[in-house]
Each structure stands twice: as C-alpha cells, then as structure tokens.
Amino acid sequence: MKRSSNSEVDNLSRKEVKLTSDNNNLFTQLPPEVIHQIVSFLSGSTKFNEFDFFSNRTKEELQPFILPLENIKTLNTLIKYTSKNLRDNLFLITSTSDKSNTMKDESQTEENNAELSLFENHWLNCYNFQEILLYWIRTSGFDSLELGQGDISRREMIKMCKIQNLIQCKERGKVMSKLKEAESADYEDYNEDDNDEEDEEDEDNKKKDKKKEESDDVPFNSEDQAQKDLKERFQQLALSKEDYQQQEGNNNIFGLFIFKSLILSLSMNDYFDCDIKETWGVDSRYLLPSEKIDQWLGDIDYSIPKWKRGQYNKNYGDSNKMIGLSIEDPLGWERFITNTRFVPPEDENEAEKKAQERLRTKQQKELKGQSSNEKEEEEKKQINLGPMISESELREKFSNFIFLNLKNIAFFGEQFKDYIFPNSIQILSLYFDSHDFYKKRPKEEWNNLFQNVTFPNVKYLRIYVDESISENSYYYRRMRNNNKEEEEEEEMKGDELKSLLLKRLLQKNRFPKLNHLVLNGIASENLFGECDEALVKQLMTIEVKPDREFEEGCKEIYRSISRLDSQSLKYVVIQTSLDPRRDSSVSFSDLQDFYSEPSFVFSIGYYSIAQYYYICNE
C-alpha cells in the first residue's frame, strides 16, 4: 500500500485542509469536518472506550448498534465514486510516520508513530467498537450457564460449578456468592458412593473435609476485580495505535472495519464453528443462511438418505438475495467455469428411484470387472458441459459475492492454475469430506494442492476437514474381488493430509491479508510447524475446533499457539472437553492457566458448553 507523505497527512489532520475535486464531484468540495460527520453517521458508534456501554447491555440491547448492510454498501460506494485524493485521505492512510526516513532519532520516531490523522483515528475507533461488540455478542451465552448438572458425582458437580464461576468471571465479568448458583435445581447425586473411597476414614474427618470443600468453593467472588479484569480484556482485544501500525502492511484500518462489520451485519457469528449452540441439526458449512448462498453442485446423490445430502437452495435464480457462493465438488467447479448449472429434478422421489437403479447397474458392472477409468468416462458422457468461460467472465461471476465456499476442490485446472480471485471475496471456507478431490489425480500432483491460486483480499479463512477423513477405514481402498487388473486408488492418511493442507494453504503470498483463521477438524501438538511463518505472524484471531480423536488434546493445541512468535495475535478460541468424568478433559486449573495467558485473550467457545450439556446425562 502506497504511503502518503508527511505533509499530506499533516494537512489532513488540520481542519483547513482543502480536498481536490475530480469530475466536479460535489462531495469532495465539502469541508473535512462535514465529511467526517457524514462518514460518522454511516459508520455508527465508536464508543469502544466506554466500558459500561457494553458491560451493562444484553445481546438484545446491542442489536441496534450493529451496522446495517446498507451502510456498509454506501461506504463502499463512496470509495468507488469519490476522487482518488479523497479515497486516499478518507480510507487508505496508514500512519503519520514515514518509516522510510531512518534518520530520525528514536524518541522522535516513537512520538510520530503514535500520531494518527483525523479519519485514521475515526476508523481505528470504529474497528475497535465492532471488535468489542462482536466479542460481547458471541460470548453472551455464558451469562445463563448451569453446569452443575448431569449424571455426575457431588465432587464432579463442584468442579463444574467452579469452572462456571471461572468462565463467567473471565468472559463476562460476573461472579457468584455461592456455588449453588451454578447447580441445577433437579440435580441429584446418583454417584454419591463414588466419593467415599476412604471407607476406613473417620466420619468426622470426612464431614470436615466436605465442609472445607464447600466453604472455599467460590474462587472468584470480587465483583470489582472481575470488572477490572474484563476491562483489561476489552483493552487487550482492541487495536492500539501501535498494534495498528504493525498491521498496516497487511490491512488498512478501513478494510478491517468493513470486514468486522460484515460479520456482525450478516450474523455470521451465529454460524461460527466454536460457537454453535446445538450439537446436532445445525449446518455451519456456509457461515450464512442457505437462502443467501448461490450453490453450484456437481450433482445430488439421491442414493444416500435425504438427511445426509445437505440443503439445496432452489432459489438460485434470485441473485439479489445472494451474497455467498458455494461451489461443491470438482464437477461443480467444471459446471461453474462452463456456466452449466445443475438443475435438480422437480420430482425427488422419481430421482431417488432412478439413482437406486443407477447404483445397482454400477455395482453389477463392478462385479463384471469394469475399470475405474471406464466408469469415470461413462459418467462424463452423461453430463453436457458448455465451453469454458474466459478469465474476465469468471471474475465477473465472482464479483457479486463476499463469501465463497469451496467443497472438495483443490485443483482449478490448467487454465486457472494461477488464478487471482477478485477482492470482493473476503470470507473463504474450504470444506473437505471426501478423498476424491486428490486421489483421482496422479500422486506426484498431491504436493501441488491449490496450485498457485491466490486470494488477495480474504481476511477470514475457515478450513473444515470432516471426521470421515480421519477414520482408518478411509485410508486405503481395497481392490474389489481381488481383481488385480483394477487399479488401487491410494489415499493419504488423515494426519498426513491435514498437515499437507495447512502447509499448502497457509502461505502469505496466497493470503496476504488473512487475519482470522478457523481450523475445524484439524489439530496437532505442532499445529503451525510447517506453515509460512510470515503468515502466522499476521494472524489476529485463531479458532480451533478439533475432531473427536483430538478433542481432549486442547492443552497441546493451546501450548502450540502460545509458543507462536506473534505480536499481532489478539484472540484465541479453542473448543474444549469439559466432562469431569474424563481424566483427559480440561480441569479448573488448566482453564485458569489458559485465561491467564498474557499475550492474547482466550475463550473456550460456546460449543464446549453445548457438548457438555449433550453428554453430561449419559
């Protein structure tokens, strides 16, 4: 990003600055203070420094402060239709210091680095307001916890009450006077005998121990201290002027503000993987409601049960509602770049019958020894694809969307191997639930996943690897009927594939503006070991939701992230196992250590709570 000179920035800081006018644009002729009032009206509140503004409001009371999508569109329109000089002054200035001037002494440089322009300060305050607003809304579910419940013993129940006290104190600034406040009204100690391991102990000693245990049970009961800690948490989440100057090479502050505003305006936080409120029945694949998604499917497999197929948006023709795009499976990509849309049949029951017939025919041909190549060629003949569109046409198709979901797509073809996705795409989800996206290609191509495609303006990246990828039964396909003539299709083991995905994806030249990373189904003790260090250092938010095989290894995940050498990292969310009946679950002391991390703000994500509610009565 090109830096303005010191004189230009100093002029902008003064009220008497005169902005040039291109094409007689009347907006550019307004005084800066009037422009500032207009922009302030469109960009909403900036009261992030007013602690009570958030802490005394519920989620519902904060809804009116979410910036409407129309305001965001208007701000973007201002950028598009105002003069270049005004765009630079309003939206693209990064700092009043000129870092190319190395002749300044240290004290002078430090003083100038802290000085920001009028509009630069405005966008920094706007961004921080949106950041704290998002945090306060997404953690609002912690206000009404009741963890002292389930088929657990009295001792285990006390552990859960302490954990609730810790979570509510750190996340929301709330304290308890008694542990009973976290105990469910219908809790019964079905496992009371489990606590009586020392049968030979004197009964008086046991009563004394129990009394001590219950009298010391509220670790956090100082409301003043809890509010002080919460205020420090807000300050740590917010970007300081110094933090902003470290980020300026990756993202300008106006771009960060627009990105954060979009998440809230579109209610994307309701679909965040770590914040899902239910363990079943919620499909967070798209991070948006399905009616806002333009889906390009390869096909619908009617041979599988309906509940497994996912939801298909049949209103794909209404482009006015679509702000997200989903291209699903390699065949879906082929359809997208040839403008050959899959149209679902009107009669799904008839389609299911035909699918079952095709499945039986396919199985019969496999029994007769038909090779996999023959089957693939036959399937292609049934699809009439149009001619491939040009790169400019492809860019035009993408330009209407801010969200892109790519399912089981890691190769884009020879024509688009170096494709640069347009800046309109700010939010990207990569979803994998099948090995087919790579195993049908030559093995020597596996290390070239995603080829050289780049996403220059993606700020939010979610990599979702379904649990089926990790299951041992999916590692290698056995040859059918011991037919040695049929080629065996080798698959990478789950851990190897996940490691390769991270290595190939997390590169700064592929995602130069990435600052929010979500990993779902990917976890290891050395999470970012083979990733581009330059990209990892620019991340501001990391969220991890491990698969079931590693869900109790959150301590290793936490240690892996805490070892990162990053001054940009602000917020870390890790889905944890809270079940006190499992030795491998996190304990009260573990969580206390997590929340005490000085270099970033930690949260457990509400899905940890939802999962505990689901299993605690088993």
Image (tube, rainbow, N blue to C red):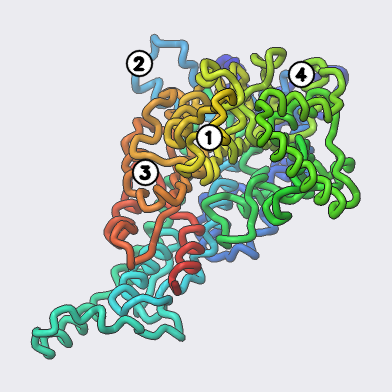
Q: Within 10 angstroms of label 1, few (less than 14), some, or many (20 or more) residues?
A: few
Q: Amino acid at mark 3?
A: Ile
Residue at (29%, 69%) from the top-left corner? 219
Q: Which residue is mark 3?
A: 557
How far is the residue under mark 1 from the one under mark 3?
Answer: 31 Å
- The answer to which of marks 2 and 3 sits earlier in the sequence is 2
Asked which quadrant contains residue 84, the reply is top right
How far is the residue under mark 3 from the one under mark 4?
Answer: 52 Å
Q: Which residue is mark 1?
A: 477
Give the numbered dot on residue 20. 4
Q: Amino acid at mark 2?
A: Asp
User: What is the x, y in percent for residue 575?
Assistant: 45, 52
Residue at (40%, 58%) from the top-left corner? 577
Report the front residue among 126 and 133.
133
Q: Are marks 2 and 3 in contact (CB under 8 Å)?
A: no
- The answer to which of marks 1 and 3 sits earlier in the sequence is 1
How far is the residue under mark 2 from the one under mark 4?
Answer: 34 Å
Residue 13 appears in the figure = no
